[in-house]
Image (cartoon, grey):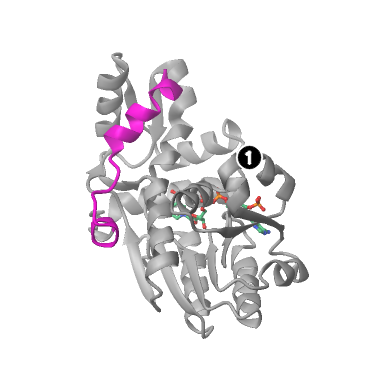
Amino acid sequence: MIGIIGATGTIGEALLKRLVELDVPARALSREPEKLRARLGEKERSMIEVASADAAEPESLRQSLKGVSQLFMAMSNSPKQIELETSIIQIAVECGVEHLVKISSPAFEEKAPVAIAGWHQEIERILSDSGLQYTVLRPYAFMQNLLRFAPTIAAQNVFFGSMGDSSCNFIDCRDIADVAAEVLTNRKSSGQIYTLTGSETFSYPQIASMLTDLLERPIRYINIPSQELYRNLIEQGQLPPWIANHVIEIQAMATVIPERPTDTIRHLLNREPRTLAAFLHEHKEAFR
Ligand SMILES: NC(=O)c1ccc[n+]([C@@H]2O[C@H](COP(=O)([O-])OP(=O)(O)OC[C@H]3O[C@@H](n4cnc5c(N)ncnc54)[C@H](OP(=O)(O)O)[C@@H]3O)[C@@H](O)[C@H]2O)c1
């Protein structure tokens, strides 16, 4: 049985869809099982078991991991992430899970530190010492993150950032889910680390230009100092300081370390990654 932690999340939801497409049954874990059940379509309901589990409550994990041999784990970022993911790994070992697929992040870099990448680095270390077979997926920025710019684009034709014209990797979460499904069903490897990107990098000015063509009105990217972006994220975006800080650190990293695409999607899935142009086109109405 495949267990999915993070089934209500961006990648997890796409993973459930992919497994159902492949006719592979799974067990989806959630702190809010009723909400998850209500989101499933008819075919999904017939193939996906829903279990109530909270990583902060070890007994609920023990119950829900009974009979699980393959476990997928995409946990939302939180200051308790190391503690929670460590507990999942320990209980997975106790419960006889054979292989765990962890969603991580691009590697931690000393010269452009990103605190959350440091958390993932620590969890990866704990996973590799756990005795479990494991696969680590390190995706770059999700294309889905760009939807967070939709409100200012729709209202003022602008979006803000502090990474100038640095080029970044973007990946569609559905490609991450497709890789996870492939690894969970066909490639029981151990110790593999896959860095996942789209096939091209893009800067924010280039994305503004793509949106300009797509929406047929001028869209501008406005570069602002990182301290100002931090203040805006907290005051207007109502983000907690640690998330605002994460955004700043990620953007600073892009200015310091050049990002390059990998060919991992092509190699694992035998097809090209989904493109940013297609993603923007699909979500055109959100930016209107
Ligand atoms: N956004 C990016 O661009 C990006 C890039 C690289 C890496 N990442 C990494 O991707 C991961 C997040 O993936 P995502 O965006 O797909 O997830 P997400 O949308 O943030 O959702 C995460 C899931 O975590 C589950 N969760 C949170 N606390 C839990 C708990 N105590 N017990 C059980 N489940 C819990 C939630 O399930 P319930 O609420 O249903 O319980 C939810 O389904 C993060 O670790 C992040 O560092 C993100």
Is any atom of residue 153 visible in this view?
no
Q: In which quarter of the image is the C terminus?
A: top left
For the point 24% across and 33% down, which residue is it?
206
- Kindly identify the residue that appears in the image at 25 percent across and 26 percent down: 209
Residue highlighted by disc 1: 39
Query: Magenta stretch: dominant SS?
Result: helix
Q: For this rendering, which residue is in front, 57 or 38?
A: 38
Quadrant containing the N terminus is bottom right
Q: What residue type is labelled 1?
A: Arg
Left or right, 236 with respect to 143, comes to right
Q: Is residue 132 above or below residue 123?
A: below
Of the pair 47 and 5, the residue shown nearer to us: 47
- Which secondary structure lies at badge 1? helix
Above-or-below relation of 97 to 258: below
Residue 261 locus on image (x, y percent): 24, 54
Residue at horizontal 22 percent and vertical 46 percent from the top: 200
Foreground residue among 43 and 284: 43
Q: Residue furthest top?
A: 217
Indicate the position of residue 69 as horizontal and vertical percent values.
Answer: 56, 74
The residue range painted magenta reads: 265-288
Displayed quadrant of residue 108 = bottom left
Residue 216 appears at what percent x and percent y? Answer: 28, 14
Q: Does the residue labelled 1 lie within 8 Å of ligand 1?
A: no
Q: Is residue 80 left or right of residue 133?
A: right
Residue drawn at (30%, 33%) of the image: 278
**152 shown above or below 202:** above
Local crowd size for mark 1, using a 10 Å CA cut-off: few (<14), some (14–19), many (≥20) = few
Q: Is residue 152 visible?
A: yes
- Which quadrant of the view contains residue 146? top left
Question: Would you say residue 40 sits in the magenta stretch?
Answer: no
